[in-house]
Image (cartoon, grey):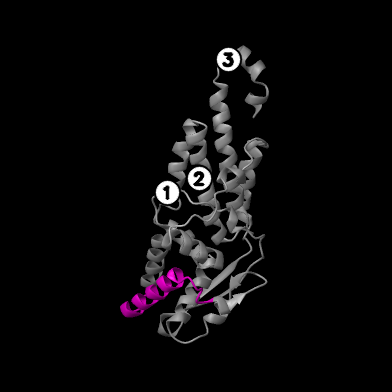
Amino acid sequence: MFIIKYQDKVSRYTRIDIENIKFLRDCLAILKKLISTFESDKTKISDCYVWLCKGIEALQYLSSSNNNPFAGILSRSLLNYTLGSDFGGLWCLAFAFTPKGRYYFNQKFVHGAQINESPAINSFDITNVTFVNPVEDIQSIYMDSIFEEGSTEVSLDMVEEGSIRQVTATIDPPMLDLADVTSSSNQPVNHFVAARQYLKSILEQFRIPGQTITDIITLFNTYINSDNDIFSDDMIQERQEYGWEEISHRDGNVSIFADIALRVISA
């Protein structure tokens, strides 16, 4: 920002490509927003999926529309290290366990529909970027990682029949509108499949019997594929969330399904 602000004076003493500096500034504006969102203890893990999709798409936009040479590299790296990685299924699954996520996955991956045409770049203010002292930024991140415990405490215990019981307390964060999420044909990863594979890995990790795993994966497929929300009667309207804790006290595989949903959305 200093170089851009004082480019006339800087150019007197050194040869520098101001356009490339501006390209980097635009990319850093997107990454700065993502980092601040992920660092916040008020950000839900299900919302992380939304912001990652928007960040990747915004960088792709800068690459294709603005001929930004850095944005294409960063968009591919961001995708490969997040939603395109083995761990990416966790973000996909967390989003899928929300009413908005279930609807989004149903529309996009089952029906192939686009949820919204609004450009993801609109979610990032690349024209008004301010950066404080970078040393202070680094110290802030370092201190936060040591002394802040966050707003979520989770304890897991194995109980009868391999289900997972969980107690969690969280601070309610601000809601993120699904309307901000847009489809991108440049993303080759099917996030419905990634979420399902991650769910299967959780079940295998807790040594759930094979037939039970098959039945729960079938339940997950039905949950996403059905145009009618099978848990609509269990919606907590004021929070627009499913009552997974209450559902977890039911009999059968739906109890395990809900226990895992509680665990994932509170990760």
Looking at the picture, how far across and down is residue 239, in whole percent? 65, 69
> Predominant secondary structure in magenta?
helix
In the image, residue 210 lies in the stretch drawn in magenta? yes
Rate crowding at label 1 as few (under 14), some (14 to 19) or many (20 or more) other CA atoms within 10 Å: some
Asked if one can make out residue 46 in the rendered structure from this viewpoint, the answer is yes
Mark with earlier residue (3, 1): 3
Foreground: disc 3 or disc 1: 1
Foreground: disc 2 or disc 3: 2
Q: What is the three-letter code of the residue carrying label 1?
A: Gln
Rate crowding at label 3 as few (under 14), some (14 to 19) or many (20 or more) other CA atoms within 10 Å: few
At mark 1, the secondary structure is loop
Instruction: Using the rendered view, name the quadrant where residue 7 is placed.
Output: top right
Label pair 1/2, CB-CB below 8 angstroms:
yes
Looking at the picture, how far across and down is residue 209, in whole percent? 33, 79
Mark with earlier residue (2, 3): 3
Tag 3 residue: 14
Marks 2 and 3, how far apart at CA: 35 Å
From this view, report whether residue 198 is shown above or below residue 125: below
At mark 3, the secondary structure is loop
Tag 2 residue: 57
